[in-house]
Amino acid sequence: MPNANRSVQAVALPTESAVARLYNAPDLADAYAVRLPDNAIDDPELLARFLFAHQAGWVAKLMGLRDALVARFGLKTAKQLRTEGSGGSRERVDFFRIFTRSAHEIILGENDSHLDFRVSVLQQTRDTRDGRSRYLVLSTVVHCHNRLGRFYILAIAPFHRLVVRSTLRRAARVGWPTA
């Protein structure tokens, strides 16, 4: 029996998210939501750090494969990005650069020669059958600069969706940090 607090749903890009209006015609735009328990923390940066710290082992292996392939094309690897953010800097969440923070959303991402992408971790309150409930919405938008970027997105999009869904499901299963 599925647990409502672990069910990940594909949703439209939230209109209140800063990434929804970032690119006129994104080459990839998706969003996934999971219900947060009432006692979960409400800081989007801490929620983002929790998400990326609790990914499944297969995600790290997939990222290792990705890094081995893209390094041949001169694209940034996760290892390079983590090194850029080393030295105790809090301006990164995992290998993602922090672009903006607000009370309900943190925007992460990176710019590279082939594409720019942004990831939104947005805490959203919705009216449900049970009253008002909090959700965490993970949205991604990508703007490609060239054919390499478009090929890259075409190749990784199915894996991206699996990783995002898995990350949200796993965080819910592990148990969100509480206030």
Image: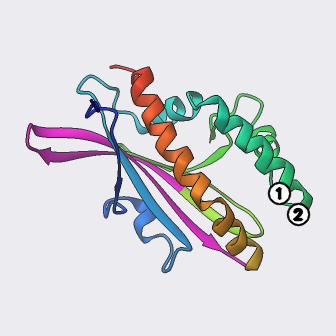
Q: Is residue 158 left or right of residue 82?
A: left
Q: Position of residue 25 (x, y in %)?
A: 50, 80
The quarter of the displayed image where residue 158 is located: bottom right
Q: Residue at x 74, y 63 (%)?
A: 112
> Which SS type dominates the magenta stretch?
strand
Q: Residue at x 39, y 33 (%)?
A: 43
The dot on residue 70 is: 1
**Disc 1, SS:** helix
Query: Any magenta on residue 170?
Result: no
Vertical arrangement, residue 37 with respect to residue 137, above or below: above
In the image, 69 versus 16, the foreground residue is 69
- Which residues make up the magenta segment? 119-146
Q: Are marks 1 and 2 in contact (CB under 8 Å)?
A: yes
The dot on residue 100 is: none
Vertical arrangement, residue 167 with respect to residue 13, above or below: above
Q: Position of residue 146 (x, y in %)?
A: 73, 79
